[in-house]
Amino acid sequence: GFAQTARRGADAADCAQGALEEIGQLSEELAPGCPPAVTGGMPVTDVAPMLAAAIKAVLTPGVDPACALSGPIDASLLHSLAAIETAAGAPAAAARSRALAILAKRNAGLVAPLAAESPSMTVETFRAHLAVVLRKLEALRGGADRRRAA
């Protein structure tokens, strides 16, 4: 296997190949089997406890589960938002949940079409406002001209 090949002074690839060949010669009884399936067909793996905990997680009150993130997130921003929530007294799990909800709402706002409607006014009112702005701009420009002359 690996150790024998290494003793002969072989390189890493040959050592790995030797180990794999030795593993391939093991009897089926010695080889580890697949983990048993649990009820519902979900295999037991190293991440099974984390998945189970996530499934049982209680959503934070006031956080809309529909505010789900899609795609990658800015981990630094997530940690900063969670730190703010924690400083405000939220437990760690709730702080993370709220931070994720904030990022989801921000992302939704960034992709939502922006509907800007100008306030309704008559043409005369608009012209009166425009005249005021133009007079103020002219006064500012006149003051700048006087300062340059001095």
Image: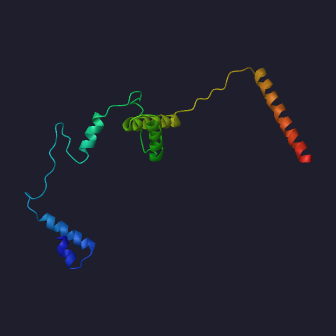
Q: Nearer the viewer, residue 120 or 94?
A: 94
- Image point (40%, 36%), residue name: 97
Q: Nearer the viewer, residue 45 or 130?
A: 45
- Image point (16%, 48%), residue name: 35
- Quarter occupied by the N terminus: bottom left
- Image point (85%, 39%), residue name: 141
Horizontal and vertical percent position of residue 56? 28, 34
Specify whether 139 is left or right of 75.
right
Q: Nearer the viewer, residue 37 or 50?
A: 50
Horizontal and vertical percent position of residue 43? 19, 44
Number of labelled discs?
A: 0
Specify whether 4 is left or right of 56.
left
Specify whether 43 is left or right of 123.
left
Q: Quadrant of residue 90?
A: top left
Q: Is 116 above or below relative to 13?
A: above
- Give the residue at the far bottom of this rendering: 8
- Give the residue at the far right of this rendering: 150
Q: How is the image coloured?
A: rainbow
Q: Nearer the viewer, residue 83 or 107?
A: 83
Horizontal and vertical percent position of residue 37? 16, 43
Q: Is 144 above or below relative to 58?
A: below
Horizontal and vertical percent position of residue 89? 43, 34
- Image point (45%, 36%), residue name: 85
